[in-house]
Amino acid sequence: MRVSILASGSSGNLTLLETQSTRILVDAGLGKRETLARLAAVGRELGRLDAVLITHEHADHCNGLPQVLGIWKSPPLYVTEPTLDALQRTLPETFKKRLKGVEKIIGGRHFSIGDIEIDPFLIPHDAADPIAFAFRTNGSKMAICTDLGYIPEHVKFHLRGSDLLVLESNHDLDMLKVGPYPWVVKQRIMSRHGHLSNHAVSEFLADPDGFDHHARYLVLAHLSDENNNIYTAEICAREALNRRPAEAAFTGELLVASQHTPLQPLEL
């Protein structure tokens, strides 16, 4: 499995998963021009797309969906029914015109696309029916888990055993508290249905009963441009990983995804 994190953040999210026979986009938060530019930046020119998966209806995860459906001639859309209802209310009319095939999915119910097995699981976020995904193929597993206010036990379960874990590390609490957002927005972000802070992620990463040491790649994702930065998030994560006991030491590679520049593709 080859994974290209093309964009991650509050202005647009887009990830490409590929095997020799299957190509899947997770979320579609960028417009046509930027989507194609990000693909070109990692050396990908897709003649076909097998599916688009949408985690939830917030604009940074779905604003580019009408254009994406147009680029690849309406690939099937995999989405929960409450999220689809929300998309139909908020996206422009071009979305409905280009929407040809819909596969309705349910959090907790396994399904497959080509040679990729997929487990969608519910996450705590202020959206209609937000989900995250774990993917398996050819003995490898990767999980994408962003946009959640805390990490429940069932989420920890789905993240275990990942060769590649993409995990939100959205904000630094101190930066958020003194930052420019209105207080009501700050409360939303810090709530149990908001976004994960660097501190919350650090507590998870330091705990061997939460985060296992299986991952070859750990990617911090969905960083806030206003309330976080790459260096702060990485320092917090490394400090937490260094607190792990020797018998559960993390020996993989720690990376930070960007809103503005795609990560080079990761091979599993």
Image (cartoon, rainbow, N blue to C red):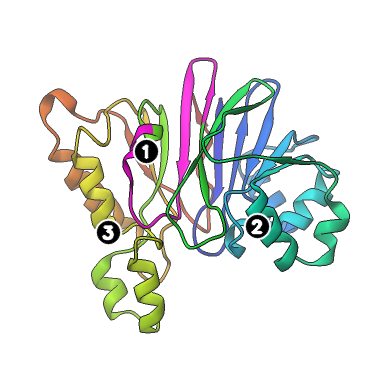
> Which one is earlier in the sequence, the residue at label 2 or at label 1?
2
Identify the residue at the far top of this view. Answer: 138
Comparing 234 with 191, the one in front is 191
> Which one is earlier in the sequence, the residue at label 1 or at label 3?
1
How many C-alpha atoms fall within 10 Å of the one at disc 3: few (<14), some, or many (≥20)?
A: few
Which image quadrant for residue 106? top right
Residue extent of the magenta highlight? 135-157
Q: Secondary structure at mark 3?
A: helix
- In percent of width and height, residue 142 lies at 47, 31
> Which one is earlier in the sequence, the residue at label 2 or at label 3?
2
- Tell me, for residue 154, which label it has, or none: 1
Query: Which amino acid, by three-letter code, is at mark 2?
Result: Cys
Query: Which amino acid, by three-letter code, is at mark 3?
Result: Thr
Q: Is residue 138 above or below residue 211?
A: above
Distance in Å between CA atoms under marks 1 and 3? 28 Å
Q: Nearer the viewer, mark 2 or mark 3?
A: 2
Whether label 2 touches label 3, CB < 8 Å: no
